[in-house]
Image (cartoon, rainbow, N blue to C red):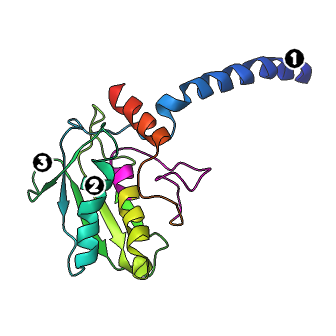
Amino acid sequence: MNVRSVAKKAALVIPAVLSFTIGMGLAHANVWEGRWKNPDSIPYVNNVSGNSVLKGLVNNGALDNWNNNQSTVTFEKSSSTTGRYIEVENVNLSSVTWSGIAIGATNNWDSNGYYRGIDIQINEALTENYSKSKLLGVVAHEFGHAVGLQHQSGSKDYLMYPYDDRNTNIISSKEKNILKVHYTD
């Protein structure tokens, strides 16, 4: 096969693949495969210690910023550390560059695609001088990862914008739609 015939075939195949990918974009873009078996009742354990402001913002981030601003998933505060749940804790790690992380969001699901558990860590070494609103954005963003959302680039108006200078701490309508499709597939 010569270079010219390969180029012609690529010219036909690439637009078809791109069209398919773009068409599937809303359904599968910016989500991991994992999801919660019962999205109407996702337990989280607030294990933040020594920082009452952050502890309160964790509850606000889950209950107010998430539960009151979309209808696909519902977080429920729990004290039980058995079964599948999200654990939220504070850490103080000056050696890392992240302000928050959702450990397990990218890969901790069973063969059915259901999350086994997620560990959200909020790094006080980087967030200690954040305003309450900015810190709430970090917390709510990590809860977004914990339900399967990946980063959403292009606008600071997305909760899943990858940097802490986002303009919001509430899920956007586009992100709501992505999440809805993810949990109804």
Q: Is residue 151 left or right of residue 137?
A: right
Q: Quadrant of the C terminus?
A: top left
Q: Is residue 155 magenta?
A: yes
Q: Do the residues under discs 3 and 1 have CB atoms within 8 angstroms?
A: no
Residue 133 seen: yes
Q: Quadrant of the N terminus?
A: top right
Q: Which residues are magenta?
A: 142-163
Tell which circle, 2 or 3, labels the residue nearer the N-terminal end: 2
Residue at mark 1: 5
| Vertical relation: 4 (above or below) 36 | above
Instruction: Give the quarter of the image for residue 57.
Output: bottom left
Q: CA distance from mark 2 to mark 3?
A: 24 Å
Judged by its main secondary structure, the magenta piece is loop
Judging depth in this view, the residue of 41 and 90 nearest the camera is 41
How many C-alpha atoms fall within 10 Å of the one at disc 1: few (<14), some, or many (≥20)?
A: few
Identify the mark at residue 83; answer none if there is no mark.
Answer: 3
